[in-house]
Image: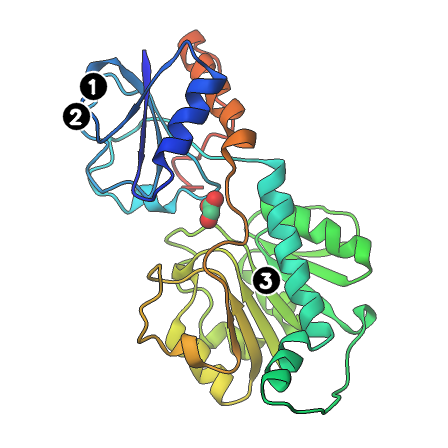
Amino acid sequence: MAIVVIRQDDKIDDWKEALQLYAPQIAVYDYREEHPREAVKMAVVWKHPPGSLQGYPNLECISSSGAGVDFLFEDDRLPKHLPITRVVDEYLSKDMSEHVIALIFSLLKNLYHYKVDQFNKIWKPVGYKRISDLTIGIMGLGALGSVLAKDLVRFGFKVRGWSSSEKNIQGVETFTGPAGRTAFLEATQILVCLLPLTDDTKGILNAGLFRQLPKGAYLINVARGGHLVDGDLLEMLDNGHLSGAALDVYHQEPLSLEHPFWEHPKVHMTPHYASVSETISVVPQIVENYRRLASGEELLNLVSEDKKY
Ligand code: GLV
């Protein structure tokens, strides 16, 4: 019985070591090394090369080492009908919440604006806003969105949330499904996207949706680049309907140097780093699932085959 780690970044050794340290009784292989493929029961993956999950005759489970699983469904050679699990982790949710809150406070107090003024040696105070001035709308109230919503409520923001199924979070005005979307958007001044990327949500951040936001609204996309229609965002920034956007995720990562986002004065970019799975906090749930697999118990954080998240 063994685990194979498949990913294309430079973290493969970290994951292998962390798994071996936490569960020395399990054999763990780097997919690039010679390994007995028939021994592998579980694949721990992140943005694997398409097709690399084939050729494991006894594979029983695919475990995403992040919160998202959209990359798996882009692989048309993904072994069919195997259980897929994802990570639900306190740190992942907290880190995301802290990142978005940092962005919101920087906006309230114009910190990015002053950084640019400083470079240009400009002394020009502009008005600031207060917490009580702002309504934040969160799209997606799952493991990440619900933690952010609660944290923002604690700070005293007016918070509203939109999700596909009904949610009840104290202090948050919630809206559901296509019918609730217009009402959700019309009073949202800062829109935070934390939706899973699925066929239903691809391109959801488009001109039609942006038009439903009040003039001057601001976009924070920390979910996936595929949610956003880049050209529509640029159009809405340039015509002044949106006041700005903070983006952590992109269609192509790293973003091509030719992309207009790099030099757009109203776009604030971070390199997909809002919230990153840490081996130390995530490995225990992966090993627990490995144990459950062997004993036939229900797996933790299972992805729905229908919903694809
Ligand atoms: C990061 O983007 C994740 O899905 O964990």
Q: Secondary structure at mark 3?
A: strand
Colour treatment of the image: rainbow
Q: CA distance from mark 1 to mark 3?
A: 42 Å
**Residue appearing at x 18%, y 22% in the figure:** 34
The residue at which mark 2 appears reads as 55
**Residue appearing at x 63%, y 59% in the figure:** 100
Graded by Cα atoms within 10 Å as few (under 14), some (14 to 19) or many (20 or more), the crowding at tag 2 reads: few
When the figure is inspected, residue 49 is found, relative to residue 107, above or below; the finding is above
The residue at which mark 1 appears reads as 37
**Are the two marked residues, 1 and 3, in contact with CB atoms closer than 8 angstroms?**
no
User: Can you say which quadrant of the picture contains the C terminus?
Assistant: top left
The residue at which mark 3 appears reads as 192
Is residue 215 visible to the viewer in this orientation of the structure? no
Q: Secondary structure at mark 1?
A: helix
Query: Closer to the observer: label 1 or label 3?
Result: 1
Question: From the viewer's perspective, is 136 left or right of 28?
Answer: right
**Are the two marked residues, 2 and 1, in contact with CB atoms closer than 8 angstroms?**
yes
Tag of residue 250: none
Q: Amino acid at mark 3?
A: Val
Q: Secondary structure at mark 2?
A: loop
**Can you tell which quarter of the image residue 92 is in?**
top right
Instruction: Provide residue 307's location: percent of width, then percent of height.
Output: 43, 42
Q: Amino acid at mark 2?
A: Gly
Graded by Cα atoms within 10 Å as few (under 14), some (14 to 19) or many (20 or more), the crowding at tag 1 reads: some
